[in-house]
Amino acid sequence: MAKKRSRRAPASPAPRTAADQRTLDALVALADDIVATAEQEEDPYLDIPSRSLSNVRYNSSKRFIEMGSGTNRRELFNLSQARSFMQTVLVSSGCKQLIEQEKTTSIRGLYYLLKHSIEGAREETFDDQSDCDPVIEDVEVTLNALREELHVYASNRGSMVGNLRLIDSGDEIDCSRMGSGGYSIPSIVEPEVIEFVKCDADFVLHVEKDTVWRRFNEDKFWRKHNCILTHGQGQPPRGVRRLLHRLHYEQNLPVYCLLDNDPWGYYIYSVIKQGSINLAYESGRMAIPDARYVGIRSQDFERCGLSPSVTITLSDADIKRAKQIASYPWFEKKKRWKKEIEQMLKNGFKLEVEALISKSVSYVTEQYVPERLAAEDFLD
Amino acid sequence: MAKKRSRRAPASPAPRTAADQRTLDALVALADDIVATAEQEEDPYLDIPSRSLSNVRYNSSKRFIEMGSGTNRRELFNLSQARSFMQTVLVSSGCKQLIEQEKTTSIRGLYYLLKHSIEGAREETFDDQSDCDPVIEDVEVTLNALREELHVYASNRGSMVGNLRLIDSGDEIDCSRMGSGGYSIPSIVEPEVIEFVKCDADFVLHVEKDTVWRRFNEDKFWRKHNCILTHGQGQPPRGVRRLLHRLHYEQNLPVYCLLDNDPWGYYIYSVIKQGSINLAYESGRMAIPDARYVGIRSQDFERCGLSPSVTITLSDADIKRAKQIASYPWFEKKKRWKKEIEQMLKNGFKLEVEALISKSVSYVTEQYVPERLAAEDFLD
């Protein structure tokens, strides 16, 4: 261990950020505990918080999904656990190496960094990527560190534009002067990377798709309504969720979500608002319980006078999914949401935001959303 | 027709760009021809250039794939063609409306804009999106206009960073000050939207994946090597290809492509360089015959001393695809490419760019690519 540590000396003498130091300390403490146990001639083990469904619950006072306190013990001297024990230590050591070198990588990169045949055996450290990914999540949850704090990032998806100036890796970015493409939201948006300089916006409008976002940007909606406009290309990735969270809590901006009138749109809203079961351990840093839904509603077919031509018949999978979502505890207790989902099932069809184009190209930016916002007509 | 035209009067009095006027004129001429034919009491028709494989060929002097001169006649008074004739006219009219209103939309948006039940019939103009998409391509190819010139765009994908200043929709963007996320390359990058202001870069390095791009950006490769760094999240979308084309021809920048050592990587290279069969009619505005491949090579397993752990066994589909690609006329005649593909087949495995991380996190940015460029060791 000592030998390895010296080989992994920091590549750069620049002072480490407080956040990096914190993560590094946690990683070293994890390893020290194992060493201490071994030195006491006891069996080394790791207690990993359980990410199973049974250890996840909806906290009705915090109003998001959170993890329970259940853990699973992973022992080195247990034939069925030895491999995952070693994988966990290996991933921890890889993250330590990244932080010390002040570099980041993708989950694919970390996999390649750590993949090798174990000396003297024909065993590989990981068989494939799917063998490595859950271990990364184990380390996250064990250390209570965001993946990004471990210097591992997901794909970039999502853009932002609006009255906001920020510093990203030393470059000052004026999000009101980003042309047609907007500011590409990175996967890592922690305060060490992204610092808000000045925010004059009154709220955030988050839209589901980049194509809809483009309509809003082209119509300069964010300028007229003084807001920040974001999208996440469907289910928003971690970086986008975390950025929305930071804008909401640090800049006190309400977050409005413009999503499709279908189970997938409802689900995206649910994840933004209450967090996801899969990433329940990150809800505290990602969930926005006060997010509001200004998406298409089941009543809009009549209210907006849409043509049957633009409706899409619900599939069996849609119907099943809608019923599932209706039974989520955070939807179940809300009369208006219950009614919304019931109405969609009764309609027998779903509606995409783009269906509003059948009224006129800019109906959604000039009429639909402004009217909903002015009337405070949203679901929460 | 006259009535419709007056209803679709321009929404904005701003002067139209020359390019928009050109496209508009072509759309109007198309409709005028139909009207003139009808007034001569002849059967209205449209001659649509054929997009079938048999009408596509490799032009060895231009060094890209282009369309032949074959056309298919589409007649109004032909039971099997009436529907697609009317759809073609409908899509043309939708594009005219967009240009007149100075708005753009996605292919999904155009579909919704035009979808309706035909008066007095129970027939829909389009059954679904897949019914509309080929008609958009028909209009593109008939008018010899890029989709973007018809004001219809594809999804945004791809980012850029480097020593380049440009104006995007009136905003000046300094691509050397774009933080970690970079400039998000829009789908429409025609000179009317994107104007190059100042370019100090010596070349373009185009990488396949955003995660690899991020490594290059984090290591400030583009600053050290004075280049522009782009990615297209896999197969680059039209906007990225068109931007590379413009940087190559307008700014005289060589384009180097860093792609995986697998049939998919070869294919991406082929599309960037020679164009695709599907979009053969756009090759003249997208293909870059002088693009160069600095991607991972089959010899790199030995040359870089990689471990068998980081190789990925070729699947049957990979082998079939590789043989197909090897028989493309533009690869077939190139000895070094033939050897490259044969070597991959002999290896029996493929290699991703990320596999180089097993050497060290920044091996690819600090050693692999700089060495290839310095030695002019690339395939073309």
Image: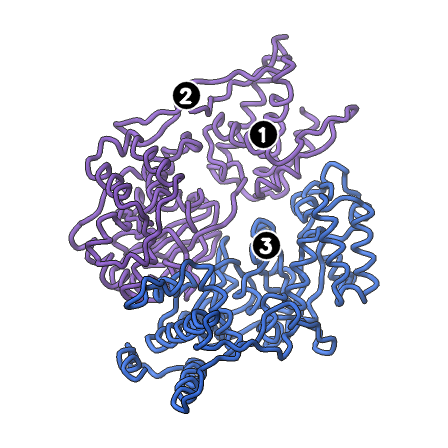
Chain colours: A purple, B blue
- State the residue position of label 3: B234
Residue A6, percent from left and from top: 68, 31
- Residue appearing at x 47%, y 22% in the figure: A49
Using the rendered image of the protein, determine whether residue A14 is visible from the camera's viewpoint.
Answer: yes
Q: Quadrant of the C terminus of chain A?
A: top left
Protein chain holding label 2 = A
Picture layout, residue B168 above or below residue A226: below
- State the residue position of label 1: A92
Question: What's under tag 1, amino acid-wise?
Answer: Ser
Question: What's under tag 2, amino acid-wise?
Answer: Ser
Question: What's under tag 3, amino acid-wise?
Answer: Gly
Q: Quadrant of the N terminus of chain A?
A: top right
Secondary structure at badge 1 equals helix
Nearest the viewer among B127 and A120 is B127
Circle nearer the viewer, 2 or 1: 2
Nearest the viewer among B357 and A72 is A72
Distance from Cα at disc 3 to Cα at disc 1:
30 Å
Distance from Cα at disc 2 to Cα at disc 1:
26 Å
Question: Marks 1 and 3: in contact by CB < 8 Å?
Answer: no
Residue A124, percent from left and from top: 71, 29
- State the residue position of label 2: A54
Residue B159, percent from left and from top: 52, 59
Protein chain holding label 3 = B
Secondary structure at badge 3 equals loop
Picture layout, residue B32 above or below residue A97: below
Query: Going by the picture, which residue comes out furthest to the bottom?
Result: B40
Mark 1 burial class by Cα count in 10 Å: few <14, some 14-19, many 20+ = many
Using the rendered image of the protein, determine whether residue B367 is visible from the camera's viewpoint.
Answer: no
Picture layout, residue A37 above or below residue A340: above
Relative to residue B315, is residue B76 drawn left or right?
A: left
- Residue appearing at x 74%, y 63% in the figure: B328
